Image (cartoon, grey):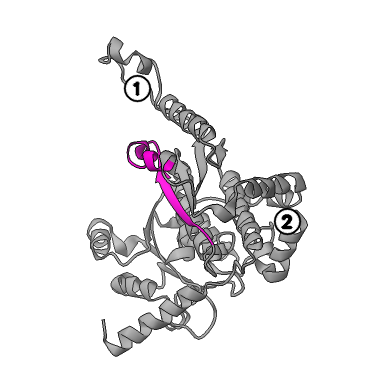
């Protein structure tokens, strides 16, 4: 049985900077007070890929109800989306935040080039490693605000560093609130031991797919962050499993038959939430034929569907975990981020693989550059 102590030691020994990022205090390379003038912008365009943007996107979606600004996330090579942004927003009055650990990410640089004419000293922040790379040189040559990316924290693990907390600060949130209770969580051996036990019971070795079955729309982007974390950290040496995000109850009407009666090679993480100001169903015209919907709320229907799904998983002896979101605040999503990182390290130890590298991805990056240079595409 893997112990909590061994997992924590793995974090400290292999990536002490990552461990420090969980703790409150001066764990950043930059003091956010130095960029307080940028908080005046009501529209913020974040340009990045993968771990450089998914954490911020998850925070924005989960806490959007309390954020008074609009954040636009440019995280793909989507020409139509770029044109839509230019058409619908006043870009001269928008803040641009460009994030790339390496400072040489092709997609980030290409998307940045599309907005080049709108970039000014007064509306541009660049986050990258302070090395000889494109973005650090670009920022310094144009006198843009430059923030050093911690070189010892990989992109997919960087949500508690400048990469996630700087956007949170610009959203009007307090970065310290995301990790104010993480020290307690790290020292809560009972909680962490239970996490390890739950993972051990899921029969990871026989599973090919992990389904995030999600009844909470505000969690969708957090699950995309989780998808990258698990896929890049564990998909090595013919090991790992495919993390799939499945939206419920929509997927009750498309994928549920396969999930429940198809190959038994899947694990389910079922996400739901406590009711929060759910709308009442307009049932005036239902009549007696739909009496089960009268005086019900939207949340009542989703809760009944979730309970029915879990009951069926039990009957069919399909492994699952249930996660219930009780509050939508910084502390909750901070604990979610930490829990997934901790459990990823646990899974890596079970599979005897290194969770911090990504050798296959690096090979594709090199080949892509070779193809572009040779014009053979």
Q: Residue at x 28, y 57 (%)?
A: 89
In which quadrant of the rendered view does residue 44 lie? bottom left
Residue 26, can we see it? no
Residue 47 in the image, given as x and y percentages of width and height? 39, 66
Q: Which residue is mark 2?
A: 2
Residue 94 in the image, given as x and y percentages of width and height? 35, 61
Q: Which residues are magenta?
A: 240-259
Q: Which mark is residue 281?
A: 1
> Left or right: 324 with respect to 220?
right
Please identify the quadrant where the N terminus is shown. Answer: bottom right
Of the pair 230 and 279, the residue shown nearer to us: 230
Q: Residue at x 42, y 39 (%)?
A: 261
Q: Is residue 275 above or below residue 131?
A: above
> Left or right: 24 with respect to 266?
right
Residue 369 in the image, given as x and y percentages of width and height? 37, 83
Of the pair 52 and 364, the residue shown nearer to us: 364
Residue 289 in the image, given as x and y percentages of width and height? 29, 13
Q: Residue at x 69, y 64 (%)?
A: 11
Q: Is residue 331 above or below residue 36?
A: above
Of the pair 1 and 278, the residue shown nearer to us: 1
Q: What is the crowding at mark 2: few (fewer than 14 residues within 10 Å), some, or many (at least 20)?
A: some
Q: Is residue 362 above or below residue 246?
A: below
Magenta region includes residue 238: no
């Amino acid at each position: 049985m893997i112990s909590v102590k061994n997992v924590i030691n793995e974090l400290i020994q292999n990536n002490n900077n990552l461990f420090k990022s969980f703790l409150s205090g001066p764990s950043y390379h930059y003091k956010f007070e130095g960029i307080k003038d940028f908080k005046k912008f009501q529209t913020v365009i974040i340009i990045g890929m993968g771990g450089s943007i998914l954490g911020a996107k998850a925070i924005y979606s989960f806490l959007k109800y309390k954020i008074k600004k609009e954040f636009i996330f440019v995280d793909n090579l989507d020409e139509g989306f770029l044109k839509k942004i230019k058409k619908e927003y006043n870009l001269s009055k928008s803040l641009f935040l460009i994030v790339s650990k390496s400072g040489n990410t092709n997609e980030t640089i290409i998307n940045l080039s599309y907005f080049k004419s709108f970039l000014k000293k007064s509306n541009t922040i660049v986050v990258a490693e302070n090395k000889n790379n494109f973005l650090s040189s670009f920022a310094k040559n144009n006198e843009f605000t430059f923030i050093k990316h911690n070189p010892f924290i990989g992109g997919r693990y960087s949500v508690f560093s400048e990469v996630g907390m700087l956007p949170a600060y610009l959203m009007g949130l307090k970065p310290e609130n995301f990790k104010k209770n993480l020290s307690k969580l790290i020292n809560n051996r009972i909680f962490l031991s239970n996490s390890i036990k739950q993972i051990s019971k899921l029969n990871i070795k026989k599973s090919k797919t992990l389904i995030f079955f999600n009844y909470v729309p505000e969690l969708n982007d957090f699950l995309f962050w989780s998808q990258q974390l698990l896929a890049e950290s564990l998909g090595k040496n013919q090991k790992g499993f495919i993390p799939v995000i499945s939206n419920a109850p929509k997927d009750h009407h498309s994928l549920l038959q396969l999930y429940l009666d198809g190959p038994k090679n899947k694990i389910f993480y079922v996400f739901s939430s406590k009711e929060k100001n759910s709308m009442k169903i307009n049932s005036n015209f239902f009549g007696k034929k739909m009496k089960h919907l009268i005086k019900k709320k939207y949340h009542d229907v989703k809760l009944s569907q979730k309970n029915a799904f879990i009951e069926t998983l039990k009957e069919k002896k399909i492994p699952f975990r249930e996660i219930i979101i009780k509050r939508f605040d910084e502390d909750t999503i901070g604990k979610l981020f930490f829990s997934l990182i901790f459990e990823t390290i646990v899974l890596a130890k079970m599979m005897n693989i290194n969770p911090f590298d990504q050798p296959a991805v690096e090979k594709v990056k090199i080949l892509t550059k070779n193809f572009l240079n040779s014009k053979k595409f």
